[in-house]
Image: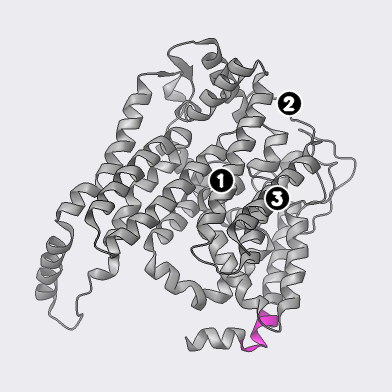
Amino acid sequence: MKRIYEVLLISAGFLIICLVYSGQRRATINPGWDASYYYNITEQIQKGTTPVAGELPFIKRIATPYLIARMSNVTGINLLDSALAINLLGTFISTLLLLFWLRIFFEESWIRVLLCFLFMMAWHVPLRFSFYNPLTTDAWGAAWMMAGLLILQLVRKSCADGRNRAWIGYIMVYSLVIGVAALFRESNAILCVLPFFVVYPLGELNIVSATPPITRGINILRKTVRIFFTWKTALLLIPVLFVLGATMILKKFIVVTAPESYSYIWTAISWLYLKTLPEFVLGILIAYGPLILLVPFFYGKYKSVLRERQELWVLLIVSLLLGLIGGSDTERILFMTGFPVVLVLIGISIRQIFYSTQRWWFYLLLVLQSISFRFFWSLPEYPGVNPHAPIPFFGIAGSHFKYLNLYSRFSNYYLNCILLLQFLVLFLATWYVLRNRTVLRKDKSL
Protein backbone atom coordinates (compact mmCIF):
# COMPACT_ATOMS: atom_id res chain seq x y z
CA MET A 1 0.00 0.00 0.00
CA LYS A 2 1.34 3.43 -0.95
CA ARG A 3 2.07 5.77 1.91
CA ILE A 4 -0.52 8.32 0.85
CA TYR A 5 -3.20 5.61 0.93
CA GLU A 6 -2.21 4.70 4.48
CA VAL A 7 -2.52 8.32 5.55
CA LEU A 8 -5.91 8.61 3.85
CA LEU A 9 -7.09 5.38 5.46
CA ILE A 10 -5.98 6.52 8.92
CA SER A 11 -7.62 9.92 8.33
CA ALA A 12 -10.88 8.30 7.27
CA GLY A 13 -10.77 6.01 10.31
CA PHE A 14 -10.15 8.99 12.56
CA LEU A 15 -13.16 10.84 11.18
CA ILE A 16 -15.41 7.78 11.44
CA ILE A 17 -14.41 7.22 15.07
CA CYS A 18 -15.12 10.87 15.81
CA LEU A 19 -18.57 10.60 14.23
CA VAL A 20 -19.43 7.34 16.00
CA TYR A 21 -18.35 8.46 19.47
CA SER A 22 -19.27 12.15 19.22
CA GLY A 23 -22.52 11.30 21.01
CA GLN A 24 -20.56 10.47 24.14
CA ARG A 25 -22.06 12.42 27.03
CA ARG A 26 -19.50 14.85 28.41
CA ALA A 27 -18.50 14.41 32.03
CA THR A 28 -19.15 17.16 34.54
CA ILE A 29 -16.00 18.91 35.74
CA ASN A 30 -15.94 17.69 39.31
CA PRO A 31 -13.80 19.39 41.99
CA GLY A 32 -10.59 17.44 42.50
CA TRP A 33 -10.53 16.04 38.95
CA ASP A 34 -7.57 16.93 36.76
CA ALA A 35 -9.96 18.78 34.45
CA SER A 36 -10.93 21.23 37.20
CA TYR A 37 -7.31 22.32 37.61
CA TYR A 38 -6.74 22.59 33.86
CA TYR A 39 -9.95 24.61 33.48
CA ASN A 40 -8.80 27.11 36.08
CA ILE A 41 -5.40 27.47 34.38
CA THR A 42 -6.94 27.81 30.91
CA GLU A 43 -9.44 30.40 32.10
CA GLN A 44 -6.65 32.56 33.53
CA ILE A 45 -4.73 32.42 30.24
CA GLN A 46 -7.88 33.30 28.32
CA LYS A 47 -8.39 36.38 30.49
CA GLY A 48 -4.76 37.44 30.11
CA THR A 49 -3.85 36.90 33.76
CA THR A 50 -0.09 36.91 34.42
CA PRO A 51 1.50 35.11 36.06
CA VAL A 52 -0.78 32.08 35.81
CA ALA A 53 -1.45 30.42 39.16
CA GLY A 54 -2.16 26.74 39.66
CA GLU A 55 -1.36 23.64 41.63
CA LEU A 56 1.28 21.04 40.95
CA PRO A 57 1.68 19.02 38.80
CA PHE A 58 -0.93 20.58 36.50
CA ILE A 59 0.60 24.04 36.27
CA LYS A 60 3.74 22.45 34.78
CA ARG A 61 1.68 21.34 31.75
CA ILE A 62 0.75 24.81 30.63
CA ALA A 63 1.22 24.44 26.88
CA THR A 64 -2.06 22.67 26.10
CA PRO A 65 -4.15 25.09 28.21
CA TYR A 66 -2.39 27.90 26.34
CA LEU A 67 -3.46 26.48 22.96
CA ILE A 68 -7.02 26.01 24.20
CA ALA A 69 -7.25 29.55 25.57
CA ARG A 70 -5.85 31.09 22.40
CA MET A 71 -8.29 29.15 20.22
CA SER A 72 -11.18 30.26 22.41
CA ASN A 73 -10.05 33.89 22.17
CA VAL A 74 -9.68 33.76 18.39
CA THR A 75 -12.84 31.80 17.55
CA GLY A 76 -15.16 32.81 20.39
CA ILE A 77 -15.86 29.13 21.13
CA ASN A 78 -16.21 28.24 24.80
CA LEU A 79 -13.28 26.63 26.59
CA LEU A 80 -14.61 23.06 26.65
CA ASP A 81 -15.40 22.96 22.92
CA SER A 82 -12.06 24.59 22.18
CA ALA A 83 -10.36 21.95 24.33
CA LEU A 84 -12.11 19.20 22.37
CA ALA A 85 -10.98 20.64 19.02
CA ILE A 86 -7.40 21.20 20.20
CA ASN A 87 -7.07 17.71 21.66
CA LEU A 88 -8.63 16.02 18.63
CA LEU A 89 -6.09 17.81 16.45
CA GLY A 90 -3.29 16.70 18.76
CA THR A 91 -4.53 13.12 18.66
CA PHE A 92 -4.71 13.15 14.86
CA ILE A 93 -1.12 14.41 14.63
CA SER A 94 -0.03 11.80 17.20
CA THR A 95 -1.67 9.05 15.14
CA LEU A 96 0.02 10.12 11.91
CA LEU A 97 3.40 10.35 13.63
CA LEU A 98 2.77 6.89 15.11
CA LEU A 99 2.15 5.61 11.58
CA PHE A 100 5.51 7.03 10.44
CA TRP A 101 7.16 5.51 13.54
CA LEU A 102 5.73 2.06 12.79
CA ARG A 103 7.13 2.19 9.25
CA ILE A 104 10.58 1.84 10.80
CA PHE A 105 9.67 -1.60 12.16
CA PHE A 106 7.04 -3.08 9.83
CA GLU A 107 6.86 -3.56 6.09
CA GLU A 108 3.27 -4.80 6.28
CA SER A 109 0.76 -1.98 5.84
CA TRP A 110 -2.01 -3.88 7.58
CA ILE A 111 -0.01 -4.18 10.80
CA ARG A 112 0.73 -0.45 10.84
CA VAL A 113 -2.90 0.45 10.20
CA LEU A 114 -4.16 -2.05 12.78
CA LEU A 115 -1.86 -0.68 15.49
CA CYS A 116 -2.88 2.90 14.71
CA PHE A 117 -6.52 1.83 14.85
CA LEU A 118 -5.98 0.25 18.28
CA PHE A 119 -4.30 3.46 19.43
CA MET A 120 -7.30 5.51 18.37
CA MET A 121 -9.88 3.10 19.81
CA ALA A 122 -8.53 2.70 23.35
CA TRP A 123 -11.20 4.19 25.63
CA HIS A 124 -8.69 5.71 28.08
CA VAL A 125 -6.59 7.72 25.62
CA PRO A 126 -7.18 11.06 23.89
CA LEU A 127 -9.39 10.38 20.86
CA ARG A 128 -12.42 8.80 22.53
CA PHE A 129 -11.67 10.13 25.98
CA SER A 130 -11.62 13.73 24.70
CA PHE A 131 -15.35 13.51 23.99
CA TYR A 132 -15.85 12.47 27.62
CA ASN A 133 -13.35 14.87 29.20
CA PRO A 134 -11.91 17.45 26.78
CA LEU A 135 -9.58 19.08 29.32
CA THR A 136 -6.57 16.78 29.17
CA THR A 137 -2.96 17.24 28.08
CA ASP A 138 -2.10 13.75 26.83
CA ALA A 139 -2.82 14.31 23.13
CA TRP A 140 -0.22 17.00 22.53
CA GLY A 141 2.20 15.42 24.98
CA ALA A 142 2.08 12.28 22.81
CA ALA A 143 2.47 14.29 19.58
CA TRP A 144 5.68 15.96 20.74
CA MET A 145 7.01 12.70 22.16
CA MET A 146 6.48 10.96 18.81
CA ALA A 147 8.11 13.87 16.98
CA GLY A 148 11.13 13.55 19.26
CA LEU A 149 11.42 9.80 18.69
CA LEU A 150 11.28 10.24 14.92
CA ILE A 151 14.01 12.89 14.98
CA LEU A 152 16.05 10.58 17.22
CA GLN A 153 16.07 8.04 14.39
CA LEU A 154 17.70 10.67 12.17
CA VAL A 155 20.26 11.23 14.93
CA ARG A 156 20.94 7.48 14.94
CA LYS A 157 21.31 7.23 11.17
CA SER A 158 23.57 10.26 10.81
CA CYS A 159 25.76 9.01 13.67
CA ALA A 160 26.04 5.55 12.12
CA ASP A 161 26.90 7.06 8.71
CA GLY A 162 29.55 9.34 10.20
CA ARG A 163 27.84 12.53 8.94
CA ASN A 164 28.88 14.75 11.83
CA ARG A 165 27.39 18.00 10.51
CA ALA A 166 24.02 16.40 9.97
CA TRP A 167 24.29 14.74 13.38
CA ILE A 168 24.89 18.08 15.10
CA GLY A 169 21.95 19.62 13.24
CA TYR A 170 19.59 16.81 14.23
CA ILE A 171 20.74 17.02 17.86
CA MET A 172 19.87 20.73 17.90
CA VAL A 173 16.43 20.10 16.38
CA TYR A 174 15.86 17.21 18.80
CA SER A 175 16.80 19.45 21.73
CA LEU A 176 14.31 22.10 20.65
CA VAL A 177 11.52 19.55 20.20
CA ILE A 178 11.90 17.92 23.60
CA GLY A 179 12.29 21.32 25.25
CA VAL A 180 8.83 22.18 23.93
CA ALA A 181 7.55 18.66 24.68
CA ALA A 182 8.36 19.08 28.37
CA LEU A 183 5.95 22.05 28.50
CA PHE A 184 3.10 19.77 27.45
CA ARG A 185 3.93 16.83 29.75
CA GLU A 186 6.78 16.91 32.24
CA SER A 187 7.30 13.17 31.71
CA ASN A 188 8.63 14.04 28.24
CA ALA A 189 11.75 15.38 29.93
CA ILE A 190 13.06 11.79 30.05
CA LEU A 191 13.61 12.05 26.29
CA CYS A 192 16.69 14.18 26.95
CA VAL A 193 18.71 11.12 28.05
CA LEU A 194 17.80 8.88 25.09
CA PRO A 195 20.57 10.15 22.73
CA PHE A 196 23.19 8.76 25.14
CA PHE A 197 21.83 5.24 24.49
CA VAL A 198 21.75 5.86 20.74
CA VAL A 199 25.30 7.17 20.41
CA TYR A 200 26.88 5.08 23.18
CA PRO A 201 25.12 1.71 23.47
CA LEU A 202 25.87 -0.06 26.74
CA GLY A 203 27.26 -3.07 24.87
CA GLU A 204 30.34 -1.09 23.89
CA LEU A 205 31.70 -1.57 27.42
CA ASN A 206 32.45 -5.23 26.74
CA ILE A 207 35.34 -6.38 28.95
CA VAL A 208 36.53 -10.00 28.99
CA SER A 209 35.40 -11.49 32.30
CA ALA A 210 38.43 -13.83 32.51
CA THR A 211 40.78 -10.96 33.37
CA PRO A 212 41.68 -10.35 37.05
CA PRO A 213 39.32 -7.98 38.91
CA ILE A 214 41.87 -5.14 39.23
CA THR A 215 42.85 -5.38 35.57
CA ARG A 216 39.24 -5.58 34.56
CA GLY A 217 38.43 -2.44 36.55
CA ILE A 218 41.30 -0.54 34.99
CA ASN A 219 40.24 -1.67 31.50
CA ILE A 220 36.65 -0.57 32.15
CA LEU A 221 37.85 2.84 33.34
CA ARG A 222 40.12 3.30 30.32
CA LYS A 223 37.44 2.23 27.90
CA THR A 224 34.87 4.44 29.60
CA VAL A 225 37.13 7.48 29.23
CA ARG A 226 37.92 6.62 25.60
CA ILE A 227 34.29 6.08 24.64
CA PHE A 228 32.40 8.70 26.61
CA PHE A 229 34.77 11.62 27.07
CA THR A 230 34.54 12.96 23.52
CA TRP A 231 33.17 16.05 21.81
CA LYS A 232 29.95 14.16 21.07
CA THR A 233 29.31 13.67 24.77
CA ALA A 234 29.37 17.42 25.31
CA LEU A 235 26.81 17.90 22.52
CA LEU A 236 24.58 15.21 24.00
CA LEU A 237 24.15 17.46 27.03
CA ILE A 238 22.38 20.04 24.86
CA PRO A 239 18.96 18.28 25.08
CA VAL A 240 19.34 18.25 28.87
CA LEU A 241 20.10 21.98 28.84
CA PHE A 242 17.06 22.69 26.64
CA VAL A 243 14.76 20.87 29.07
CA LEU A 244 16.28 22.75 32.01
CA GLY A 245 15.97 26.00 30.07
CA ALA A 246 12.31 25.36 29.27
CA THR A 247 11.67 24.70 32.95
CA MET A 248 13.38 27.93 33.99
CA ILE A 249 11.46 29.97 31.42
CA LEU A 250 8.20 28.40 32.57
CA LYS A 251 8.83 29.50 36.16
CA LYS A 252 8.73 33.13 35.04
CA PHE A 253 5.14 32.81 33.84
CA ILE A 254 3.56 30.66 36.56
CA VAL A 255 2.97 30.73 40.29
CA VAL A 256 2.58 27.47 42.15
CA THR A 257 -0.24 27.70 44.68
CA ALA A 258 0.09 25.65 47.85
CA PRO A 259 3.48 24.16 46.86
CA GLU A 260 3.57 22.25 50.14
CA SER A 261 0.49 20.24 49.13
CA TYR A 262 2.27 18.27 46.39
CA SER A 263 5.71 16.70 46.07
CA TYR A 264 6.86 14.54 43.17
CA ILE A 265 9.12 12.52 45.49
CA TRP A 266 6.53 11.91 48.19
CA THR A 267 3.87 11.11 45.59
CA ALA A 268 6.17 8.48 44.09
CA ILE A 269 6.95 7.00 47.51
CA SER A 270 3.30 6.91 48.54
CA TRP A 271 2.16 5.15 45.36
CA LEU A 272 5.03 2.70 45.61
CA TYR A 273 3.65 1.81 49.03
CA LEU A 274 -0.06 1.93 48.21
CA LYS A 275 -0.23 0.28 44.78
CA THR A 276 -0.21 -3.51 44.99
CA LEU A 277 1.40 -5.80 42.44
CA PRO A 278 -1.91 -7.43 41.34
CA GLU A 279 -3.44 -3.97 40.88
CA PHE A 280 -0.43 -2.87 38.81
CA VAL A 281 -0.50 -5.99 36.64
CA LEU A 282 -4.23 -5.57 36.05
CA GLY A 283 -3.57 -1.95 35.09
CA ILE A 284 -1.15 -3.13 32.39
CA LEU A 285 -3.69 -5.63 31.07
CA ILE A 286 -6.51 -3.08 30.99
CA ALA A 287 -4.25 -0.48 29.36
CA TYR A 288 -3.20 -2.64 26.41
CA GLY A 289 -5.90 -5.33 26.28
CA PRO A 290 -5.66 -9.08 25.60
CA LEU A 291 -3.20 -8.67 22.72
CA ILE A 292 -0.49 -7.77 25.25
CA LEU A 293 -0.54 -11.43 26.31
CA LEU A 294 1.21 -12.37 23.06
CA VAL A 295 4.30 -10.32 23.87
CA PRO A 296 5.98 -12.66 26.42
CA PHE A 297 5.87 -15.57 23.98
CA PHE A 298 7.79 -13.86 21.17
CA TYR A 299 10.74 -12.35 22.99
CA GLY A 300 13.08 -14.14 20.63
CA LYS A 301 11.58 -12.22 17.72
CA TYR A 302 11.98 -8.73 19.11
CA LYS A 303 15.00 -9.01 21.41
CA SER A 304 17.30 -7.94 18.57
CA VAL A 305 15.23 -4.77 18.11
CA LEU A 306 15.57 -3.91 21.80
CA ARG A 307 19.26 -4.75 21.76
CA GLU A 308 19.90 -2.54 18.74
CA ARG A 309 17.68 0.30 19.94
CA GLN A 310 18.44 0.54 23.63
CA GLU A 311 16.45 3.76 23.96
CA LEU A 312 13.33 1.61 23.62
CA TRP A 313 14.37 -0.31 26.75
CA VAL A 314 14.73 3.00 28.58
CA LEU A 315 11.28 4.19 27.47
CA LEU A 316 9.71 0.87 28.43
CA ILE A 317 11.29 0.87 31.90
CA VAL A 318 10.34 4.51 32.48
CA SER A 319 6.76 3.78 31.38
CA LEU A 320 6.43 0.89 33.83
CA LEU A 321 7.99 2.96 36.60
CA LEU A 322 5.67 5.92 35.99
CA GLY A 323 2.69 3.57 35.82
CA LEU A 324 3.66 2.29 39.25
CA ILE A 325 4.47 5.56 41.02
CA GLY A 326 2.93 8.25 38.81
CA GLY A 327 -0.62 8.32 40.10
CA SER A 328 -3.94 6.56 40.51
CA ASP A 329 -4.88 6.27 36.82
CA THR A 330 -2.38 3.51 36.11
CA GLU A 331 -3.87 2.58 32.75
CA ARG A 332 -3.63 6.03 31.20
CA ILE A 333 -0.10 6.68 32.47
CA LEU A 334 1.17 3.30 31.26
CA PHE A 335 -0.33 3.69 27.81
CA MET A 336 0.56 7.31 27.13
CA THR A 337 4.19 6.95 28.23
CA GLY A 338 4.88 3.53 26.69
CA PHE A 339 2.71 3.05 23.60
CA PRO A 340 5.50 3.73 21.03
CA VAL A 341 7.42 0.74 22.39
CA VAL A 342 4.63 -1.58 23.49
CA LEU A 343 2.71 -1.27 20.21
CA VAL A 344 5.88 -2.24 18.35
CA LEU A 345 6.24 -5.34 20.54
CA ILE A 346 2.58 -6.21 20.04
CA GLY A 347 2.96 -5.71 16.29
CA ILE A 348 5.96 -8.06 16.09
CA SER A 349 4.03 -10.67 18.07
CA ILE A 350 0.98 -10.27 15.83
CA ARG A 351 3.13 -10.76 12.73
CA GLN A 352 4.48 -14.04 14.09
CA ILE A 353 1.14 -15.55 15.00
CA PHE A 354 -0.62 -14.25 11.90
CA TYR A 355 1.74 -16.08 9.53
CA SER A 356 1.26 -19.39 11.33
CA THR A 357 -1.50 -21.95 11.65
CA GLN A 358 -2.46 -20.25 14.94
CA ARG A 359 -3.93 -17.29 13.09
CA TRP A 360 -7.38 -18.22 14.40
CA TRP A 361 -6.18 -17.54 17.94
CA PHE A 362 -5.14 -14.03 16.89
CA TYR A 363 -8.66 -13.44 15.58
CA LEU A 364 -10.07 -14.58 18.92
CA LEU A 365 -7.75 -12.22 20.80
CA LEU A 366 -8.80 -9.41 18.46
CA VAL A 367 -12.45 -9.98 19.37
CA LEU A 368 -11.58 -9.91 23.06
CA GLN A 369 -9.52 -6.77 22.44
CA SER A 370 -12.60 -5.04 21.03
CA ILE A 371 -14.49 -5.91 24.22
CA SER A 372 -11.67 -4.80 26.49
CA PHE A 373 -11.26 -1.49 24.62
CA ARG A 374 -15.05 -0.94 24.74
CA PHE A 375 -15.59 -0.65 20.98
CA PHE A 376 -19.33 -1.15 21.44
CA TRP A 377 -20.04 1.10 24.42
CA SER A 378 -19.54 4.69 25.44
CA LEU A 379 -18.11 5.66 28.80
CA PRO A 380 -20.57 5.76 31.71
CA GLU A 381 -21.44 8.99 33.42
CA TYR A 382 -19.69 9.92 36.63
CA PRO A 383 -20.35 8.76 39.28
CA GLY A 384 -22.70 6.52 37.30
CA VAL A 385 -25.62 4.35 38.25
CA ASN A 386 -25.31 0.79 39.47
CA PRO A 387 -28.70 -0.90 39.08
CA HIS A 388 -27.12 -4.33 39.22
CA ALA A 389 -23.72 -5.83 39.83
CA PRO A 390 -21.63 -5.48 36.64
CA ILE A 391 -20.43 -8.70 35.07
CA PRO A 392 -16.81 -8.38 33.98
CA PHE A 393 -15.57 -10.06 30.82
CA PHE A 394 -12.14 -8.64 29.94
CA GLY A 395 -13.71 -5.34 30.87
CA ILE A 396 -17.19 -4.25 31.86
CA ALA A 397 -19.92 -4.37 29.23
CA GLY A 398 -22.52 -1.65 28.87
CA SER A 399 -22.61 1.94 30.06
CA HIS A 400 -24.77 1.72 33.17
CA PHE A 401 -22.35 1.16 36.01
CA LYS A 402 -20.03 3.19 38.20
CA TYR A 403 -17.45 4.92 36.04
CA LEU A 404 -14.58 4.27 38.44
CA ASN A 405 -15.07 0.50 38.07
CA LEU A 406 -13.16 0.84 34.79
CA TYR A 407 -9.92 1.48 36.67
CA SER A 408 -7.89 -1.09 38.57
CA ARG A 409 -7.26 1.38 41.38
CA PHE A 410 -10.88 2.34 42.04
CA SER A 411 -12.78 -0.81 41.13
CA ASN A 412 -13.86 -3.22 43.84
CA TYR A 413 -12.01 -6.32 44.93
CA TYR A 414 -14.62 -8.66 43.40
CA LEU A 415 -14.36 -7.20 39.90
CA ASN A 416 -10.58 -6.98 39.96
CA CYS A 417 -10.19 -10.61 41.03
CA ILE A 418 -12.49 -11.85 38.26
CA LEU A 419 -10.71 -9.80 35.61
CA LEU A 420 -7.29 -10.99 36.77
CA LEU A 421 -8.50 -14.59 36.72
CA GLN A 422 -9.87 -14.17 33.20
CA PHE A 423 -6.59 -12.75 31.91
CA LEU A 424 -4.66 -15.52 33.68
CA VAL A 425 -6.81 -18.21 32.02
CA LEU A 426 -6.38 -16.49 28.66
CA PHE A 427 -2.61 -16.34 29.17
CA LEU A 428 -2.47 -20.06 29.94
CA ALA A 429 -4.70 -20.82 26.96
CA THR A 430 -2.41 -18.75 24.72
CA TRP A 431 0.59 -20.63 26.04
CA TYR A 432 -1.14 -23.95 25.35
CA VAL A 433 -2.12 -22.98 21.80
CA LEU A 434 1.35 -21.72 20.91
CA ARG A 435 3.19 -24.53 22.70
CA ASN A 436 1.63 -27.10 20.38
CA ARG A 437 3.02 -25.36 17.34
CA THR A 438 6.54 -24.74 16.08
CA VAL A 439 6.07 -20.98 16.57
CA LEU A 440 7.58 -21.08 20.06
CA ARG A 441 10.04 -23.83 19.24
CA LYS A 442 11.47 -21.74 16.45
CA ASP A 443 11.92 -18.86 18.88
CA LYS A 444 13.98 -21.11 21.17
CA SER A 445 16.29 -22.04 18.36
CA LEU A 446 17.13 -18.43 17.52
* Front in this rendered view, residue 314 or 327: 314
Q: Residue at x 65, y 15 (%)?
A: 76
Judging by the rendered image, the residue that carries numbered circle 3 is 121
Q: Earlier in the sequence, mark 2 or mark 1?
A: 2
Residue 152 drawn at (x, y percent): 38, 53
User: Is 65 left, or right, of 25 in this rendering?
Assistant: left
Mark 2, other Cα within 10 Å: few <14 / some 14–19 / many ≥20: some
Q: In this view of the protein, can residue 175 be seen by the observer? A: yes
Mark 3, other Cα within 10 Å: few <14 / some 14–19 / many ≥20: many
Residue 200 drawn at (x, y percent): 26, 61
Asked if the residue under mark 3 is in contact with the one under mark 1, i.e. CB atoms within 8 Å, the reply is no
Judging by the rendered image, the residue that carries numbered circle 2 is 28
- Which mark's residue is nearer the viewer, 2 or 1? 1
Q: Earlier in the sequence, mark 1 or mark 3?
A: 1
* Front in this rendered view, residue 419 or 76: 76
Q: Which mark is residue 94?
A: 1
